[in-house]
Image: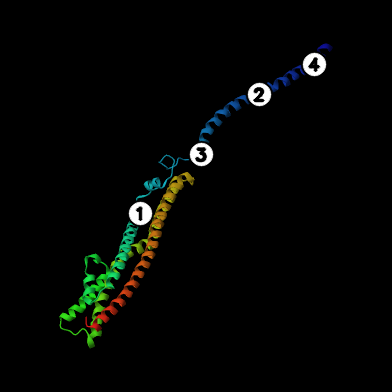
Amino acid sequence: MLENKRTTPLLAMIGALALMASAPAFAQEAAAPTTEAAAPAAAEAAPAAAPEGKAPPTIDSHGGKLTPVAMFLDAEPVVKVVMIGLMLASVFSWVLLITKLFEFSGLNRKSDRFVEAFRGAKSINDMGRIGISEEFEGNPLADMAAAAASEVELSRQAGLQIAGEHRDSTIMRAQTAVSAVQSTLSKRLSGGMQFLASVGSSGPFIGLFGTVYGIMNSFIGIANTNTTNLAVVAPGIAEALLATGIGLFAAIPAVIFYNYFQTRISAFGTRTDGFTAELMNAISRQLDKGA
């Protein structure tokens, strides 16, 4: 009886120790399903997060290169019309430049030859004959001399006294005929200047209109795509800014050409004024000589 009482506590202690030794194994087996269940959830969450970090595709459709030609082709229709109009204006400005350069170059050479021939005239009739010669056809100075000589001849044919006390009246009529030729000359030399002035003053603003319209559409695209990624936004803004660049490209040469030709027109106007004085003096001398 005494041995049974001693054995019972001993068996109880051995059972307790065995139970404690087996507890970590049970804990590991219980935790394993939890870890295995969490793994699929993490795997499913990973693909969902990937698209958020992925850069959206760009709108550049020209092999990844954003060139001026590509920007022009991708521009909005309104912006494209603005660019085409400005480029045509620029082309016309350069054509006008070349035309005017040839015009003034030929004008000065022919004027120099005419003045040399005019100074060798011996009478008013000689002045008129030199002025209407084919060699100097279309030259403003020759037209002025021909008009003055023609007016004196018409007064003589009308039976008017052109010398003596009527000398001043004759010179005044000749002066009026020369002034009429000068007015025509001013209109002729000023041809195209209004176009250059218009392109120079309005070109930047027309280009700015295209830029504002293009940037407005770019911001609308930003709002629709819900992204501010430069790869998406930059091409549209660059296309819009190209319109302003073309506007400046058209306006700057137009302003330079306008100022240059205005200086040339003023210089030739001064030359015609000097020739008018020389022409009137020559007519006055011939009238005093009775020619």
Note whether residue 1 is visible: no
Quarter of the figure with the C terminus: bottom left
Neighbours of disc 4 within 10 Å: few (<14), some (14-19), many (20+): few
Nearest to N terminus: mark 1 or mark 3: 3
Give the mark toward the camera: 3 or 2.
3
Neighbours of disc 3 within 10 Å: few (<14), some (14-19), many (20+): few
Task: Say which residue label 1 marks.
Answer: 87
Residue at the image point whose x is 33% and y is 75% from the top: 274
Where on the picture, by quarter, is residue 115? bottom left
Residue at the image point whose x is 27% and y is 81% from the top: 285
CA separation, marks 1 and 3? Answer: 43 Å
Q: Dots 1 and 3: beta carbons under 8 Å? A: no
Note whether residue 33 is visible: yes
What secondary structure is found at the residue carrying circle 2?
Answer: helix
Task: Say which residue label 3 marks.
Answer: 52
Nearest to N terminus: mark 1 or mark 4: 4
Q: Dots 4 and 3: beta carbons under 8 Å? A: no
Give the mark toward the camera: 1 or 3.
1
Neighbours of disc 1 within 10 Å: few (<14), some (14-19), many (20+): some
Task: Say which residue label 4 marks.
Answer: 10
In this rendering, the count of numbered labels is: 4
Is 257 located above or below residue 127 in the figure? Answer: above
Nearest to N terminus: mark 3 or mark 2: 2
Tag of residue 28 = 2
Give the mark toward the camera: 1 or 4.
1
Tag of residue 250 = none
* Percent x, y of residue 5: 81, 14
* Percent x, y of residue 69: 39, 46
